Amino acid sequence: MLMDVDKRKKLLGYLRRVRYDTFENTCKQLGIQYSLPPPYTRRVTKRWLVKKAFCIRVFQEAQKLKAAQKLKAAERLKQRQRQARARGRQVQEKPGQEKEAQEKPVQEKPLQEGTPV
């Protein structure tokens, strides 16, 4: 019986590829609901399961590292912004100090004759 079912699947697959309208008609008459076979099948072995679990674990660790890098980058950005704000405050304070320095005249020493410049 299993051999006949396999043969029917093969014939229906062929009919589906060659003449789809006939395939649909045949399925309706026989009351068959045809499901497509998977495009690729792999034997499940213990080695394959271990490898798959390892790959999943590596992927998860990589995602964690990416998330940690994003957090570090965000922290660095915040720190740079704080430093820029602090520099901005210093720059705002300095012009006032420079004005005071500009108001005080700088006394020049008189040049002595006979000394090289």
Image: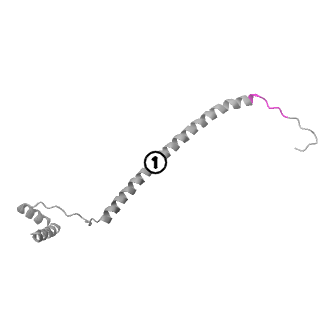
Q: Position of residue 59 (x, y in %)?
A: 39, 56
Q: Position of residue 78 (x, y in %)?
A: 52, 40
Q: Is residue 110 left or right of residue 103?
A: right
Give the residue number, with chain letter if any, for mark 1.
68
Q: Amino acid at mark 1?
A: Ala
Tell me the quarter of the picture where residue 45 sits.
bottom left
Going by the picture, which residue comes out furthest to the right? 114
Tell me the quarter of the picture where residue 34 sits.
bottom left
Q: Residue at x 89, y 38 (%)?
A: 111
Q: Nearer the viewer, residue 38 or 48?
A: 48
Going by the picture, which residue comes out furthest to the left? 29
Q: Circle 1: is it few (<14), some (14-19), or many (20+) Cα within 10 Å?
A: few
93 lies above or below 51 = above
Most common secondary structure along the magenta stretch: loop
Q: Which residues are magenta?
A: 102-108
87 lies above or below 103 = below
**Display coloring:** one colour
